[in-house]
Amino acid sequence: MIYIKKGKEPESLTRHRKQPFASYDNCNKDDIRTNLLEEQGHLCAYCMRRITKEHMKIEHWYPESKLDEAGRMDYSRMLGCCEGHLDGTRHEDDTCDTHKGDSVITLSPLNEVHIGKIKYRTGGGEIYSDDADMNRDLNETLNLNCTVQYLKENRKAVLDTLKVNLRGKGTLGRNDWERLLKKYSDVNEEGQKREYAGIVIWYSQKRLGTL
């Protein structure tokens, strides 16, 4: 999971909210998806998999079912998430918003302090937190260590590939780690961040001593 800085809501949503009988159900969701993809670098807000406009969900961090109509149309609550389900698998093997359902979670990708409490085990790619509530959100509610969907394995593969690429370059200095941190924090020419970027961001911050 990486920190998401919310931007301005789509103009179509601002206009829509002013209309009689405006509701979340009849707003322009295509514009919302476009905004969310740009904000998040085309990564799922929770598991950091690649998402596209055709294969994503608009997630309300605080459950939509518990909000009034104004809350449902509040863009600051919205996140872009993967579909969280693989055909032929059980609900207990779902992840992210699909597994979360109507549960209220503590951990928010919109809170930089929260993201700073997330850690990874480099040997297996497991995501966790020393904060008990946040660890429960990661492991149980969002199911981000799901073995069926290979999330741990994919995170580990990204970090292992980085280590292989760094091998032979000698001891990296502070400037090297800062450049690497920037590379995985920023988007590329297509406006995309690298899949599972969070594990490399965390690893770089550890080397820089900023965690």
Image (cartoon, helix red, strand yellow):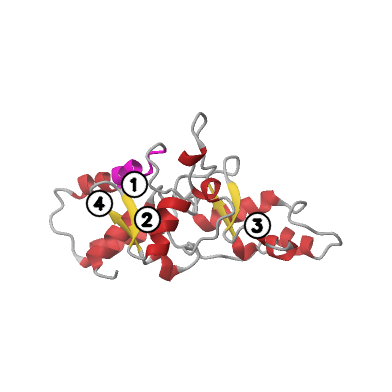
Position of residue 60 measured from the top left corner of the image (x, y, whole percent) = 60, 57
Residue type pointed to by label 1: Arg
Query: Pointer 2: what residue?
Result: 198
Dominant SS of magenta comes to helix
The residue wearing badge 3 is: 64
Q: Is residue 1 visible?
A: no
| Residue at the disc numbered 4 | 122
The answer to which of marks 1 and 2 sits earlier in the sequence is 1
Give the residue type at disc 3: Glu
The residue lying at 81 percent from left, 59 percent from top is 22
- Sequence-wise, the earlier of marks 4 and 3 is 3
In primary-sequence order, the first of circles 4 and 2 is 4
Q: Please, what secondary structure does the residue beneath circle 4 have?
A: loop
Q: Nearer the viewer, residue 58 or 127?
A: 127
Q: Residue at x 37, y 67 (%)?
A: 116
Q: Earlier in the sequence, mark 3 or mark 1?
A: 3
Q: Residue lying at the far right in this picture: please name it.
A: 20
Under mark 4, the amino acid is: Thr
Which residue is nearer to you in this view: 146 or 12? 146
Q: Nearer the viewer, residue 171 or 151?
A: 151
Marks 1/2 in contact by CB < 8 Å: the verdict is: yes
Do we see residue 104 in this rendering? yes
Q: CA distance from mark 1 to mark 2?
A: 9 Å
Quarter occupied by residue 17: bottom right
Q: Which residue is mark 1?
A: 155
Q: Are marks 4 and 2 in contact (CB under 8 Å)?
A: no
Task: Report how far apart the C-alphas of labels 4 and 2 lie in the structure.
Answer: 12 Å
Magenta highlight range: 149-158
The local secondary structure at tag 3 comes to helix
Return the x and y of residue 12 as percentages of the image width and height.
Answer: 74, 58
The tag earlier along the polypeptide, 1 or 4, is 4
* Front position among marks 3 and 1: 3
